[in-house]
Structures are given as structure tokens and as C-alpha cells.
Amino acid sequence: MALPNKKSKTAVFLINLGTPDSPNTPDVRKYLRQFLMDRRVIDIPWLNRWLLINMIIAPFRAPKSAHEYKKLWTEQGSPLMFHGVAVKELLQQALGDEYKVVLGMRYQNPSIESAAKELEAKGYNKVIVVPLFPQYASASTGSAVEEALRVLGKWEITPHIEVISKFFDHPLFIKAFAEIGRKYLAERNWDHIIFSYHGIPERQIKKASIGDQCKLGTCCQVYGSRNEYCYRAQCYETTRLLVKELGLAEGSYSVSFQSRLGKTPWIKPYTDHNIEELGKAGKKSILFFSPSFIADCLETTVEGGEEYKLLFEEHGGKDWQLVESLNTNPTWVECLKDMVVSKS
Ligand SMILES: C=CC1=C(C)c2cc3[nH]c(cc4nc(cc5[nH]c(cc1n2)c(C)c5CCC(=O)O)C(CCC(=O)O)=C4C)c(C)c3C=C
Ligand SMILES: [Fe+2]
Ligand SMILES: [Fe+2]
């Protein structure tokens, strides 16, 4: 007997980081608690992490972050969420009926567990897991995949699983970001261009060094099989490809890492230091790319679009322009489709 049609469908499981349910302090606190209790995000012993979260993050950081989230929030909610839902729908249309696309968030809602339940109930037996992080890091992709495998592994009939663990060099990912950036490059000459990526603690780079130990220096500027999973090397490679695609001149741009938390060393150079130095060096206009995010979020709109703009102005800068994220860019949807089809 032939299987019902729906059984032959492939499920596409998009996973993003997640965002609070609302910008109010209790929801932001709940989000930060779940996010930062993840041993891949704050990779210190459990008790130390618990104390840090309950003694510092929950009482002090949560209200401050809620204040930032209020600046980000729109009538449609959090951009990370509404762009995610829109991209899920666009990808579903692009892939057609042979696929079922769902979206789960690593932290808060809709959870990976609830998205997986929807698939299990319908009997999907092949799942393509797509963490929406261009560059692999244990704290982002690694955590999303760990959670997806935990949840999918509990199914009565365990599905065939494919994982797309990185796409920092996918030609359509590069093309999509370049398309958005080109609008601003055509408008005027910029004194400098920054490619800023979410930072991670240096020790997390060391832990992910397989074979050659990353020296956190110029070694990351050449990407290859020896440093395939070095997050910093993937960021430099995304930059190299974007620079090539956009035809930027050497010396007109820099790479740096943003959003650091705590006192331990994070990967360098730091974006805030980079901006201060550029301002002091007399640069008056900066175009700011954030190619570690595929949708606008707190780290692009508020940190990249507002806080860094102020910092630049405080150090003598005049014009600051954030390049918005991929959001619902059609080339980005094509990129997702291409990655899914190649795993089908
Ligand atoms: C130790 C702390 C953190 C690590 C490591 C980290 C890695 C990491 N994060 C992203 C993507 C995003 N992070 C976002 C927000 C955010 N990140 C941290 C901490 C770490 N991230 C915090 C505490 C927060 C919350 C905001 C704040 O209080 O500052 C977001 C935005 C989410 C949103 O709701 O808009 C994204 C996206 C990646 C890709 C990554 C590793 C490479
Ligand atoms: Fe983060
Ligand atoms: Fe490296």
C-alpha cells in the first residue's frame, strides 16, 4: 500500500535565537534566564552560572535590557519574530507543497518543542534543521542543533535528520547582504565601512578549535579546512566575500565584534573601540554592516543603529548609517530554498 502523500513530505525546521514575549521586565527576565542558563552560552560551572544569573542578570540586567527592548518593539512586536514568521511563509511558498516549513525559537516562543510537536503529529519522517545563524558558533548554532536533536530524538519514529550548520559563504547569502548594502554605497562616499559581528568569549573559540589551535590573531584571516569551525575565521571569510562582491577597496573597511557581556576577554577587535578610534582618526561618515544576523533585532537596530551612532558622534563622527538585515529580502529566501533543496 502506498504511503499517504503527506508522509513523503520533508519538514524544514527553521530555528532562530528567540526574543522575549514582550518588552516588559518580567518577560525579558524570563528570556534572559533561559538564554543565559544555557551552558553553551555562558560556559562556566553550573553553580557559578546560576549565581551570576540570579544575583546580577535577573535583578540588574533584566530591567536595563527591558528598557532597550522597549526601543526596539513595534506594533507588530519584536522584529526577530515578525521577520521570522514572514520568512517562514515566503519559504513555504517558494518550496511548495512537497515541504512543510516550521519556525521554532531556541529560547521562549514558539519553542522548538512546540514546532516539533506539530511535525510529529503529521508524521513527517525527514527533517532539515536550519539554524538561522550564518557563522557556526557553539553558543548559537550548536545550542539550536543540540535542542532540536533532543526534541526530535524523542519521537516514536525517529526521523531522518539533515542539518545546515553554517552558510556564511553561501553565494546567495553574500549576494543578499550586498544587495542591501549597495543601496547605501550608491548614495554617497563613506569615509569608512564597518563589518561588525556578534562577539563570543575567546575561550569558546579555543574550545571549538579542532586540529590547529586558534591563536585569535591573523590565523583567522585565512579560512580553510584547518579552521572550518572557527567562528572568527568564518566572520573574516564572510567579510572577504562581501568586500569582493561590493568591490570595496583595501583600507576602506574594518572587521570588529560587538555585544560583549561580562569581564572575560571576548574576541577582538571590539566594535566600540573600533568606532572610538575611527572617530578620533577624523572619519566623519560610517556605513555599518552586521552580517552575523539574518533579521533585525536588538543587536542591529538598537546597538548598531542607535548606541554606536551616539558613540561615533561623541568621538567626532557625523553621519552613521546602519545597513538593515536580510529580513524578507527575496535573495535571502532564495538562499534558504537553495540550501534546503541541496539537502533534500
Ligand atoms: C555570554 C553571552 C552571549 C553569547 C555568547 C552570545 C552569542 C550570540 N548571540 C547571538 C545572537 C543574538 N544575541 C542577541 C541578544 C543577546 N545576546 C546576549 C548574550 C550572548 N550572546 C544577551 C544577554 C542578549 C539579550 C540582550 C541583552 O540583554 O543585551 C540577539 C537579539 C535578540 C532579540 O530579541 O532581538 C541575537 C540575534 C549569536 C549569533 C551569538 C553567537 C555567535
Ligand atoms: Fe547574543
Ligand atoms: Fe581562528
Image: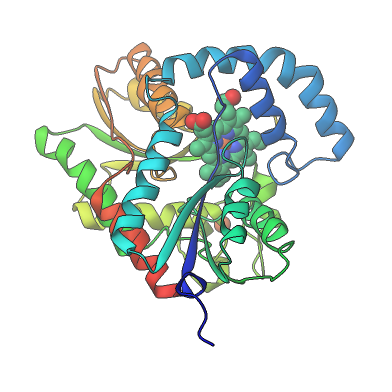
What percent of the width, then of the height, locates residue 216? Answer: 59, 51
Which residue in the rendered view is the most extreme toward the bottom? 1
What percent of the width, then of the height, locates residue 200? Answer: 60, 42
Please state if 247 lies on the left or on the right of 293 as rendered: left
Instruction: From this view, report whether residue 209 is shown above or below residue 198.
Output: below
Q: Please tell me which residue is depicted at 35% across the width and 24% down the height of the picture.
A: 305
Which image quadrant: the N terminus? bottom right
Instruction: From this view, report whether residue 205 is shown above or below residue 42.
Output: below
Residue placed most toward the observer, 87 or 204: 87
What percent of the width, then of the height, locates residue 248? Answer: 21, 49
Q: Please tell me which residue is depicted at 30% across the width and 44% down the height of the picture.
A: 328
Which residue in the rendered view is the most extreme toward the left? 187
Count the numbered circles shown: 0
Please state if 14 lies on the left or on the right of 241 as rendered: right
Q: Please tell me which residue is depicted at 32% across the width and 44% down the height of the picture.
A: 326
Please state if 335 lies on the left or on the right of 212 as rendered: left
Residue placed most toward the observer, 186 or 15: 15
Instruction: From this view, report whether residue 65 is shown above or below residue 33.
Output: above
Q: Do we see residue 210 in this rendering?
A: yes
